[in-house]
Amino acid sequence: MEKKKVRKNDFIFLIGIMLIAVLCFGIQFLTSDSGGNLIVQINGEKIGSYPLDEDVEFDINGGTNRVKITGGKVQMVRADCPDQICVHHKEISKNNETIICLPNKIVLSIESEEEAEVDATTN
Amino acid sequence: MKKTAWLGVFAALAIIFGYLECLIPFHIGIPGVKLGIANIITVVMLYKTGIKEAGIITVVRVVVVGFLFANAFSIIYSLAGCFMSLVTMYLLKKKECFSIYGISMAGGVAHNIGQLAMAVFLLETGSIWYYLPVLLISGVLTGLVIGIVSNEMLKRIKDFKITE
């Protein structure tokens, strides 16, 4: 049957997706440097910004989640949701990296504070 | 075999696959990356019966597995992914430019893009597009695996005839 045979298009698709992914990685790698601030968003609303060079641990969203900053790295240490995906997530430390808790609609992301200034000077 | 019996058997199989998936602890630090073995049934149904039956079985599986073993949020994300995936595979199959492997790979990628788009919509943040490259690669690779397994399964159930 024809459908069982591997076609040339299959390979083109596979290679194409891989190339796009590598390109995205490249762009992310080039545009990221060690981060400035941790931004905490709940329900799409920014509720706080924390510097990464200070080691702290605090509760957010009325205690449903607990965030820990150590040595410039951010980690979700506790969440009350059943899936625990954000707790298993690797530590984040670079710009644009994120940890997301879907059930509680919490987004932790790292943003550079210098970005705006750099843009202004390079223009 | 009658179609009703067929759909029942496949729905049961899809739910078992979904349960198996929940049993495998598979955390690589990026949410959304998983094997998706239950999608084997979706691909097999798409080839064996058609988009309508494949869609029904997929929705039943996602809702049942979601309520039994996961949570309501996982259902929303899974449905978004499955819808994108099924529509993509159906259209590509109609165009006949890919084999089952290519179609399954495109389905895997579309599934992950659908889930990501739903997450962007629900969380109202664009920052999670950061996951896109990882999800593209995982989608295409798991899609390939699913395609290979589905093809083997289709070969073995070739002689099964479905009657109304």
Image (cartoon, coloured by chain):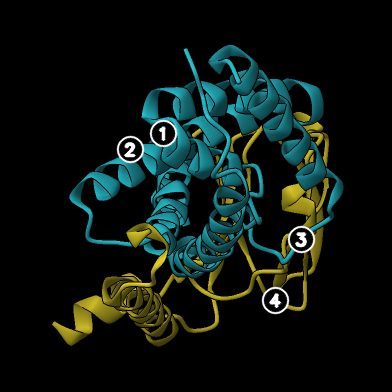
Chain colours: A yellow, B cyan
For the residues labelled 3 and 1, say whether their Cβ atoms are less than 8 Å apart: no
For the residues labelled 4 and 2, say whether their Cβ atoms are less than 8 Å apart: no
For the residues labelled 1 and 4, say whether their Cβ atoms are less than 8 Å apart: no
Q: Is residue A102 above or below residue B40?
A: above
Instruction: Using the rendered image, report if marks 1 and 4 lie on a common chain.
Output: no
Q: Which residue is mark 1?
A: B83
In the image, which disc is placed on residue B27? 3
Is tag 3's residue or tag 1's residue first in the polypeptide sequence? 3
- Residue B144, percent from left and from top: 51, 65
For the residues labelled 2 and 3, say whether their Cβ atoms are less than 8 Å apart: no
Q: Residue at x 38, y 87 (%)?
A: A30
Q: Secondary structure at mark 2?
A: helix
For mark 1, name the chain.
B
Q: Is residue A121 above or below residue A65?
A: below
For mark 2, name the chain.
B
In the image, which disc is placed on residue B87? 2
Q: Secondary structure at mark 3?
A: loop
In the image, which disc is placed on residue B102? none
Cα–Cα gap, marks 1 and 4: 40 Å
Q: Is residue B31 above or below residue B6?
A: below
Three-letter amino acid code at the position of disc 1: Phe
Three-letter amino acid code at the position of disc 2: Val
Instruction: Using the rendered image, report if marks 3 and 4 lie on a common chain.
Output: no
- Residue B29, percent from left and from top: 70, 64
Observer-nearest of B117 and B41: B41
Q: Residue at x 55, y 82 (%)?
A: A34
- Residue A65, percent from left and from top: 77, 41
Instruction: Using the rendered image, report if marks 1 and 2 lie on a common chain.
Output: yes
For mark 4, name the chain.
A
